Amino acid sequence: MTLRTIAHSRSGDKGIMINISLIAFDQRDYPRLVRHVTAARVKALFAELADGDVTRYELPLIGALNFVLHRLIGGGVTRTLAIDGHGKSLSSALLEMEIPDED
Amino acid sequence: MKTIRIGCGAGFSGDRIEPAVELAAQGALDYLVFECLAERTIAQAQQAKSRDPRTGYDPLLEDRVEAVLPACCERHTRIITNMGAANPVAAAEVVKNVARRLGLRGLSVAAVTGDDVLELVTAGEYVIVETGEPVAALGGRLVSANAYIGAEPIVEAISRGADVVITGRAADPSLFVAAQAYEFGWPADAWSQLGRATLVGHLLECAGQVTGGYFADPGYKDVADLSRLGFPIAEVPEYGAVVITKVPGSGGRVTAATCKEQLLYEIHDPAAYMTPDTVADFSAVRIWEVGPDRVAVDGGTGRPRPDVLKVSLGYRDGYIGEGQISYAGPGAVERARLAMCVVAQRLRLTGVASDELRCDLIGADALHGETLSATRGHPYEVRLRVAARTQTLRAAQRIGNEVEALYTNGPAAGGGATKSTREVMSLATTLVPRHLVSCAVSCEVL
């Protein structure tokens, strides 16, 4: 299954950094997000778009993770040649990530 | 316990106007805030001001103020906005003129200045955070330097009786923090209260993004009536949980999910959200629904503010030229890729100098790159986009011209070519000691 079934997401930018949130629809699914959506997996997923470290912050009280991608390739929104310089569309790519059906 | 009602009437410069009118008329608001200043907007506004000193404020200022001022005056709703951009004083004059035209006597309009620190950073030895180079290295390309100022001068303006407060580069949440700090009489070192107030500001500052805007995903996250999206209202008591809601009957929805998405929007470390007022901590925030379109939020706090202010530097950074053309039907992707190669070769052959060239197939790989899009089949139609960074406008124009020339010189059946150029205004950051930035408030009663 993909993350889209159990979680929602929004992304935004600050300078050359992007953050992508991942929020469980049902708080009981939060531990699955913590287990399966590691910073390393997110870094690998977006390797073509961001070449820096990925930091993961955990927010158990709202059942959410927040990923910060450092060093967006091509620079921030003001100078990049990319169409979506903000990286606002990246949340949709994260929701396509596969996780195991059953735990 | 005293509770105040704060609405957000715009989340960016080009935002819809009608939702703010609805808020002003039906929101029973104490404050209506318009957050209209993106990072690069102020650099562009500074350029406009250098061409004409009477300009440099938000282009929609007059329309927005005219639309809400009668209702705000009638209901004693104060307006706070950063629509002053590079010229809060001229913006205040515009607001006064609107008020005179509408016959609104006794209105007090304040302009907050002091965020413009161009002289300070060009005279001093400041360093660009992103590169480590001195600010002076930008030389004549440096167009603007604006410090993110906090709530204090806005509080001063309100306490001097201002009905409308206009700032330049105030930090987004500070516009909302000021209303709360004034109403509840918090001192500038009430860190935990300021952190909670920053949480309220952060949730509201993108307007419709907390009431169902930027949220809908049909079948997964449905939102009714996006064309009549209601903008948010925060009901803020002096202590305890804040309620986020909207005008009854407006479009959109306020749920725990919409509030959670906005809580983390443009946030890095949730325990250290830096603002000029406080280092806010959202890590222990709890969010729960208390009724239809009513969501309670609690647990925001804060620590002492930084001794430095963030300064946004705007500098001229060459040009971007762009051209686009579409291909459809059998072989669309192959023809678009051929066209892409032709343009790249033409630019080489004709000696167009570019620092960086980018080719996208819109509809295939433009947003997420080739790796992520490789798993999907070929689209029916695609749009080739070629963009390049150049040092001159003339070179930038050549990019679009080469794409357009694909009509008669490129692969078969290309259609809908467009071309454009723009001067690039890039941003960098520096930090200045807080005590070197002094703000002033000028206030006039009509």
Image (spheres, rainbow, N blue to C red):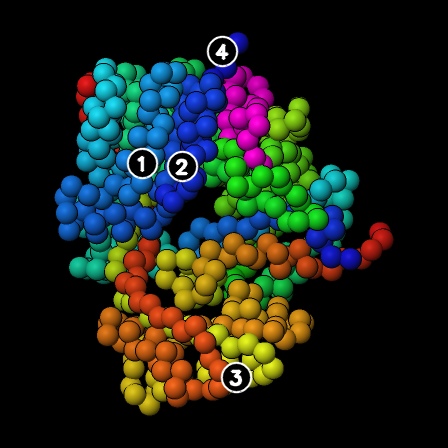
Tell me, for residue B17, which label it has, or none: 2
Question: As rendered, which of B373 and B74 lies closer to the eye?
Answer: B74
Helix, strand, or loop for circle 3?
A: helix
Taking the spot 37% from the left edge, 21% from the top edge, the residue there is B71
| Residue count near mark 4 (Cα–Cα under 10 Å), binned few <14, some 14–19, many ≥20 | few
- CA separation in Å, label 4 and label 3: 67 Å
Answer whether labels 4 and 2 touch (C-beta < 8 Å): no
Magenta stretch encompasses residue B249: yes
Which quarter of the picture shows residue B168?
Answer: top left
Q: Which residue is mark 1?
A: B63
Write the start and end of the magenta stretch as one range: B232-252
Question: As rendered, which of B223 and B341 lies closer to the eye?
Answer: B223
The chain holding disc 3 is B
- CA separation in Å, label 4 and label 1: 33 Å
Nearer mark to the viewer, of 4 and 2: 2
Q: Is residue A79 above or below residue B103?
A: below
**Amino acid type, callout 1:** Asp
Question: Is residue B72 something that shows in the picture?
Answer: yes
The chain holding disc 4 is B
x, y percent for residue B350: 30, 88
- CA separation in Å, label 2 and label 3: 43 Å
For the residues beneath circles 1 and 2, the answer to whether they share a chain is yes
Helix, strand, or loop for circle 1?
A: helix
- CA separation in Å, label 4 and label 2: 30 Å
Q: Is residue B353 above or below residue B288?
A: below
Answer whether labels 1 and 2 touch (C-beta < 8 Å): yes
